[in-house]
Image (cartoon, helix red, strand yellow):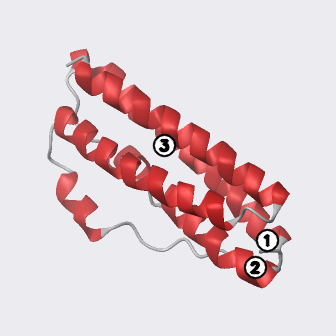
Amino acid sequence: MNSSNNVIPVLNRLLTTLYRALPVYIQGAHPWVPPERRPAMDLLHRIAGDQQMYAQRVAHAILQEGGRTEIGQFPLEYAALHDLGIDYLLKKAAEAQRRQVQIVEECVSALNGVPRLHSLAEEVLGNARGHLESLEDTMNDE
């Protein structure tokens, strides 16, 4: 895959996965968290910050390739999460993170022939896997 026309859909899939991630949504929803669970919420905020930073880098790559960014919408199911406890949100975030890792793995594979973009996707993948591990560790500490 070395044509810009072929990489743009892959990059946009990666962008949407990052930009519309559950931690990003939760960050804007401001759920109530008891003081003793504040570190769990802080983790979700750090994950959201990383996802937003990588989304910016992917968007920049799309523009460099001559494409247009397509960020999509947050999944409708996220709207039902406003009044739920942090432990449930962590569980849902871990599930969403597992899906994100799978999608990013597919994007890494699809960008295999474009070293500069493949490298970016691999970096996103490493970050996503690290966040999944952190979420799982935090859930196990409950």
Label 2 is placed on what type of residue? Gly
Is residue 109 shown left or right of residue 60?
Answer: left
Secondary structure category for the residue under label 3: helix
User: Residue 37's spot in the image, x, y percent?
Assistant: 25, 21
Is residue 94 shown left or right of residue 6?
Answer: left
Pointer 1 residue: 63
Label 1 is placed on what type of residue? Leu
Determine the residue positioned at 58% across, 49% down: 52
Label 3 is placed on what type of residue? Ala
The reply to whether residue 16 is in sight is yes
Pointer 3 residue: 48
Estimate the spatial distance between the alpha carbons at disc 3 and disc 1, rounded to whole Å.
22 Å
Q: Nearer the viewer, residue 17 or 79?
A: 17
**Residue 2 sits above or below residue 89 on the image:** below
Q: Are marks 2 and 1 in contact (CB under 8 Å)?
A: yes
Determine the residue positioned at 19% across, 19% down: 142
Pointer 2 residue: 67
Q: Quadrant of residue 112?
A: bottom right
Is residue 64 shown left or right of residue 59?
Answer: right
**Residue 88 sits above or below residue 110 on the image:** above
Determine the residue positioned at 15% across, 44% down: 84
Estimate the spatial distance between the alpha carbons at disc 2 and disc 3, rounded to whole Å.
25 Å
Q: Quadrant of residue 2?
A: bottom right
